[in-house]
Amino acid sequence: MEAVAKSEIFFLITSISVVVLTILLVWALVYVLRVLRDVKDISNTVKSETQAFSEDLRDLRTNIRSQGFAFRHVKKFFTSARDRKKGRTSETNS
């Protein structure tokens, strides 16, 4: 009889431990998924900004090749990047 009582206590403690560990695991996975979603958003932002920078740089190279080096091409490159940044910050503030 004593062995049955000990085994019931063991299974009760084991069941509670499994439930608690499962809850902790689910809680940790929720946070991991949130972090992964943020990383995905950041990587998408980096990708789009890299593409935009690449296009601006391509335009700068094309202008320099076709019209020779002129400070106005470099100025246009930086102003287009600044204007794009201003447009992005106004969109996020809306």
Image (tube, grey):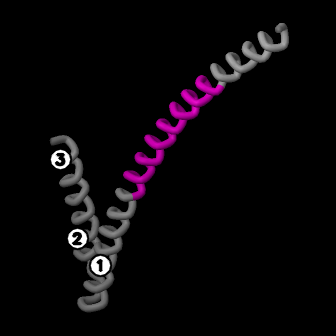
Q: Mark 1: which secondary structure?
A: helix
Measure the C-alpha gap from mark 1 to mark 3: 26 Å
Q: Which residues are magenta?
A: 18-43
Q: Which mark is residue 11?
A: none
Which quarter of the figure is the N terminus placed in? top right
**C-beta proximity under 8 Å, tags 1 and 3:** no
Q: Residue at x 51, y 41 (%)?
A: 32
As drawn, the residue found furthest toward the bottom would be 66
Tags 3 and 2 touching, CB below 8 Å: no
- Seen at 18% across and 54% down, the residue is 87
Q: Is residue 44 above or below residue 17?
A: below
Residue that numbered label 1 is attached to = 60
In the picture of the structure, the residue carrying the numbered disc 2 is 76
* Secondary structure predominantly adopted by residues drawn in magenta: helix
The single residue placed furthest to the front in the displayed view is 1
Report the amino acid beneath label 1.
Leu
Amino acid of disc 2: Lys
Label 3 environment density (alpha carbons within 10 Å; few <14, some 14–19, many ≥20): few
Circle nearer the N terminus (1, 2): 1
Residue named by callout 3: 90
Q: Quadrant of the C terminus?
A: top left
Left or right of 75: which side holds 11? right
Q: Is residue 32 left or right of residue 12?
A: left
Mark 1 near mark 2, Cβ–Cβ under 8 Å? Answer: yes
Q: How far apart are labels 3 and 2 at the CA level?
A: 21 Å
Q: Residues within 10 Å of mark 1 (few under 14, many from 20)?
A: some
